[in-house]
Image (cartoon, rainbow, N blue to C red):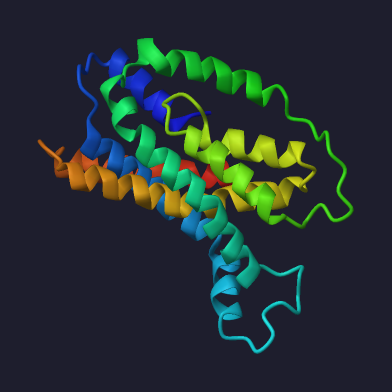
Amino acid sequence: MSSSGHLLLAQRLFGLREPELAFDLLLHLGTLAAVLFFLRTEIASIASSLFRRDPWAAPSAWGRRDLGLAIVASIPTGIIGIAFHETVETGLTFGGVGARYLVLTTLLLLTNLRFRHKADPDRIDVWEAAAIGVIQGLAVFPGLSRSGSTIILALLLGIAPVRAAKFSFLISIPAILGGAIFTLKKGVSHLPGVAPSVAGFLVALVVGYLALLF
């Protein structure tokens, strides 16, 4: 489910009038740390492929091609995120777009089927990576699950479930970092206290990792 949508829901339940951008940023960085730890083997494989003599020789391993696919996916994500960032923030209320996109996310989760047959379900083509990147960019709207929508599209394209999930998590790394940079460039006011900040970060890290693990 959408993390941003649930943050908006929590803000409404606790009576917060404005989004706590600094705290939201800390939570997303906690999730990012969980993703990095979960994908540590794949990330190490990609990094080592940059120095191998023939990085394309082992298609079953994560390597340079996956880095290229992640870059391809990140381009439309970045364009859409930049184009709609200000629009989304001006209407950042759960009663507005948030509730509608949470409903849409639920409907997407109900379509968790594979409609397309692929000869090699572990292979992701360039155009498929671009399409997944577009869907990830649209998840800038709060309530629309980033990981849920990207994984579902990958499954509909015939990509193997484990491959689809790990690729979705891989391309979330630049997306989360980009969102963090946007937030920092805006300037962050009234930072939360040390205790709630550390607690929020650690809870996001642990819960995020457990969600990825299971």
Q: Tell me: 119 left or right of 211.
A: right
Q: Residue furthest bottom?
A: 53
Which quadrant of the view contains residue 125? bottom right
Q: Tell me: 190 left or right of 22.
A: left
The percent coordinates of residue 108 (x first, y second) are: 64, 24
The percent coordinates of residue 88 (x first, y second) are: 34, 26
Residue at 43%, 44% (x, y): give it.
79
Residue at 76%, 70% (x, y): give it.
59
> Is residue 163 positioned above or below 51 on the image?
above
Q: Tell me: 31 left or right of 73.
A: left
Residue at 37%, 43% (x, y): give it.
28
Q: Nearer the viewer, residue 14 or 60?
A: 60
Q: Tell me: 85 left or right of 3.
A: left
> Is residue 122 positioned above or below 156 on the image?
below
Q: Residue furthest top?
A: 95
Q: Nearer the viewer, residue 76 or 179?
A: 76
Residue at 36%, 50% (x, y): give it.
178
The percent coordinates of residue 3 (x first, y second) are: 44, 32
- Would residue 79 be visible to someone looking at this image? yes
- Count the numbered circles shown: 0
Which quadrant of the view contains residue 48? bottom right
- Would residue 213 be visible to someone looking at this image? no
Quarter in which the C terminus is drawn: top right
Q: Nearer the viewer, residue 90 or 21?
A: 90
The percent coordinates of residue 115 (x first, y second) are: 83, 33
Which quadrant of the view contains residue 117? top right
